[in-house]
Amino acid sequence: STVMASELHVDAIKHSGGTSAMTINSSGSVNIPGSVIQVVTSETTTQISATSGSEAALGFTCAITPKFSSSKIYVRVDLQTAVTGNVGNYAIAFKVRRGTSTSDTLITEGRFGMYHNQTNVAREMFASTALSALDSPNTTSSTTYGTFVNNLDGTPTYKVSPNSGRSTITLMEIAQ
């Protein structure tokens, strides 16, 4: 006996009312609004450390190539961080940008610091810094999300992934 296979060639599956429930692009990628199309992640346990001044790239990035230009990218960054300062006040900001330059589009940021009345006494604060945002890059080209840091007050030293702490970036393409 012979087994026969069949193929159905469509560009969209629509509700009888005419609304599009699903589309398929020329590459065969399926778009169902609200669904996760792909997930990309990057992680590091290598400590990154410096004294913060003006905004600088941490060098910890993750890239995704959206299958649809209409997709949104859910960006989730979890940094294990420590900040040390020996002045009365210090504060720092960790940021996520669409790109690897300080002039690229700011996606989200988290700020924290320490304020005390003792000077010349080193204080180190550890924190898990969680950053998330929904971005609309409007492209099907590879898109890199980078992490950045800058001081807001004082001249603190920062560490990312101190003591081999695991820092991650997760990018999810969400169909629209």
Image (spheres, rainbow, N blue to C red):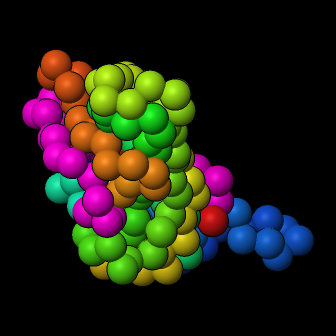
Q: Residue at x 27, y 74 (%)?
A: 101
- Residues in magenta? 31-56
- Residue 150 position in % (x across, y down): 36, 57
- Residue 40 position in % (x across, y down): 31, 48
- Looking at the picture, tell me which residue is in the foreground, 81 or 63: 81
Residue 37 seen by the camera? no
Q: Residue at x 29, y 24 (%)?
A: 122
Which residue ends up furthest to the right in the rendered image?
A: 17
Left or right, 105 with reference to 60: right
- Looking at the picture, tell me which residue is in the foreground, 120 or 52: 120
- Residue 146 position in % (x across, y down): 30, 60
Left or right, 55 with reference to 35: left
Question: How many discs mark residues in the rendered view?
Answer: 0
Relative to 95, residue 78 above or below? above
Q: Residue at x 82, y 76 (%)?
A: 18
Left or right, 115 with reference to 149: right
Quadrant location of residue 103?
Answer: bottom left
Left or right, 111 with reference to 42: right
Relative to 125, residue 107 above or below? below
Residue 136 seen by the camera? yes
Instruction: Classify the position of the C terminus by image quarter.
Output: bottom right
Please tell me whether residue 175 belongs to the stretch shown in magenta: no
- Looking at the picture, tell me which residue is in the foreground, 74 or 66: 74
